Image (tube, rainbow, N blue to C red):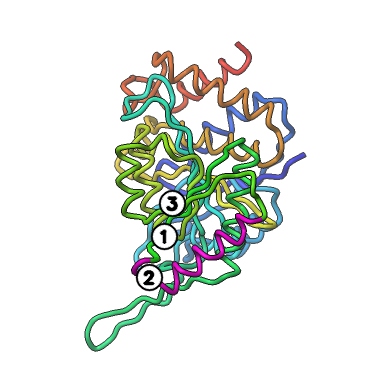
Amino acid sequence: MHKIAVIPGDGVGPEVTGAAWNVLEALEVDLDYDYAPAGEQCFQERGTTIPTETIELARKADATLFGAVTTVPGQKSAIITLRKELDLYANLRPIKSYPGIDSFYSDLNFLIVRENTEGLYSGMEYYTEEGAQAIRVITRKASRRICEFAFKQAIKFDFNLITAVHKANVLKKTDGIFKDVFYEVAQQHGHIKTEDLYVDAVAMFMVTQPQRFQVIVTTNLFGDILSDEGAGLVGGLGMVPSANIGDENALFEPVHGSAPDIASKGIANPTAMLLSSVLMLQHFGEDFEACRLEGAIRNVLKEGKVVTPDLGGQSSTREMAREVKNKIDS
């Protein structure tokens, strides 16, 4: 049995999380789950965006399924807090084309592996007399473990090229360390091809030649930006899942936000959350069930008959999820 901490959050979070869980129950995999609060509504009710008991539930679980939360100004981010508390140092975003989706390319399948704990997101930001400054933290330890994770993902999913993305021509010390460590790790995996490219070049190639990429590994800010660019290539944020993985814990979430403008309307696209559930099953080693679920999602998208308005249909979140559930055994 796999124990799951489910954190629906707010906005469309509860809608897509509920849809995903309803579909997961149709699979032949033993999942036990507990719900926990986080986000804006949690703050209004309890005075905190993420209670200690929510963090501890996630820490003890085999994985966390996270919906979406609305930012509360001046309060800590629930998702960033979980990433830090659980040391979820690797962010994984598959960029994959699916049939039936209006996208720029129909043949993409690559991974972006982003370091999740340091860089410019280290929180070391200060006001100065002239304005403000932020410190970009790059360590050998974090660079090594994210590069090792990237090579493991390449092996797991049968990719044979890893691209390290940096800006070492300008950021000579910080990105210089990242680049050096990447090639140190690469020496242990001689059967996998490697290259390194400047981030601005990668941004261009992702628009003009995205098929050239298989696994991209990079630092926090660069990975954040490139991941959203990748989502734009395959239909938008509603189509892209993500995983946050550490040595002891893992959290899976759609990359879209809480979308308060459509919350409670029942029209949120559940695809990213369903695909995040696929990543969770793969993390558990439940590869057969992961393939069943992804295949059902693919068939529903290809037919395009029971999909949400953002995908050109007229169906609700629940109706689309129900159709995916029906396709699992069809």
Q: Which mark is residue 166?
A: 1
Sequence-wise, which precedes: disc 2 or disc 1?
A: 1
Residue at screen point 55% across, 20% down:
296
Residue at screen point 31% across, 30% down:
104
- Magenta stretch, residue numbers: 169-187
Which residue type carries mark 1? His
Which residue type carries mark 3? Val
Give the residue number, with chain letter if any, for mark 3. Answer: 69
Q: In the figure, 4 relative to 81: above or below?
A: above
Residue at screen point 53% across, 21% down:
324
Residue at screen point 50% across, 17% down:
299
Quarter residue 135 falls in: bottom left
Q: Which mark is residue 171?
A: 2
Q: In the figure, 76 relative to 329: above or below?
A: below
Question: Badge 1 local density, few (<14 within 10 Å), some, or many (20+)?
Answer: many
- Tell me, yes or no, whether the two marked residues, 2 and 1, touch with CB atoms within 8 Å: yes
- Secondary structure of the residue carrying numbered label 1: strand
